[in-house]
Amino acid sequence: VIPIRRWDGKLVGMAGRAIDDQKNKKYWNYWNFTKSKYLFGQHMVSEDQLVAVVEGEMGVLRGWEHEIKVVGLMGSMPSEDQLELLASYECIFLALDKDEAGFLGRDEIKKRLSHRIEVYDTTFPDGKTDPDELTQREAQQCLLHAKKLL
């Protein structure tokens, strides 16, 4: 079970994560939690910082392990509320999964935010499609070599 907090640290919901990745549903939201209103991990990152954006809670937790400022969409496609929250950052680095859903989310963020803030896209080392799979060095290299989206 993962606590979800808003920007000021107030607990707003809980998410459960399946242990078995083969399950049909990996995440469960508790307390009628509306994940589209929040960014997971936002309470750990201030607006004046550069921040990486990933899809899920596990990607955020892994980023924190790697000492990277990161927030999660809790899905692949950002909502209107999440886009507004992302627009409050100085600069974002997209590290969404390298699959069809992740590319669609990336394109939506690029279309909606690249004229408002600096948006960079990351590439992962060969064979890796999820930020959860990256070592600390690989994750830092992804950010270092990110390309600005215009």
Image (cartoon, rainbow, N blue to C red):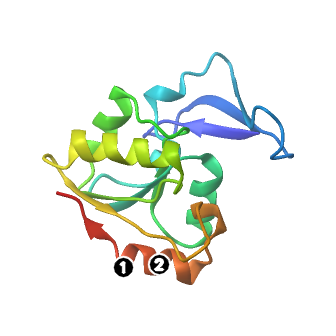
Left or right for 30, reference 107: right
Tag 1's secondary structure? helix
Give the farthest residue toward the right: 20
* Residue 98 % position (x, y): 52, 57
Q: Residues within 10 Å of mark 2 (few under 14, many from 20)?
A: some
* Residue 149 % position (x, y): 23, 59
Amino acid type assigned to the residue bearing label 1 in the image: Leu
Q: Which numbered tag is attached to residue 140?
A: 2
Front residue of this view, candidates 26 and 39:
26
Question: In this rendering, does residue 58 appear at all?
Answer: yes
Image height of 33 relative to 64, above or below: above
Left or right for 31, reference 71: right
Front residue of this view, candidates 121 and 79:
121
Please give the name of the residue rendered at 62% of the width and 77% of the height, measured from the top-left corner: 135
Amino acid type assigned to the residue bearing label 2 in the image: Gln
Q: Quadrant of the N terminus?
A: top right
Left or right for 110, reference 43: left
* Residue 123 % position (x, y): 43, 69
Please give the name of the residue rendered at 45% of the width and 36% of the height, measured from the top-left corner: 77
Left or right for 82, reference 84: right
Front residue of this view, candidates 21 and 37:
21
Please give the name of the residue rendered at 86% of the width and 46% of the height, measured from the top-left corner: 20
Q: Residues within 10 Å of mark 1 (few under 14, many from 20)?
A: few
Which of the 4 image quadrants contains residue 16?
top right
Tag 2's secondary structure? helix
Q: Quadrant of the C terminus?
A: bottom left
* Residue 3 % position (x, y): 66, 39
Give the farthest residue toward the left: 115
Question: Exactly how many numbered labels are in the figure?
Answer: 2
In the picture of the structure, the residue carrying the numbered disc 1 is 144
Q: Which numbered tag is attached to residue 12?
A: none
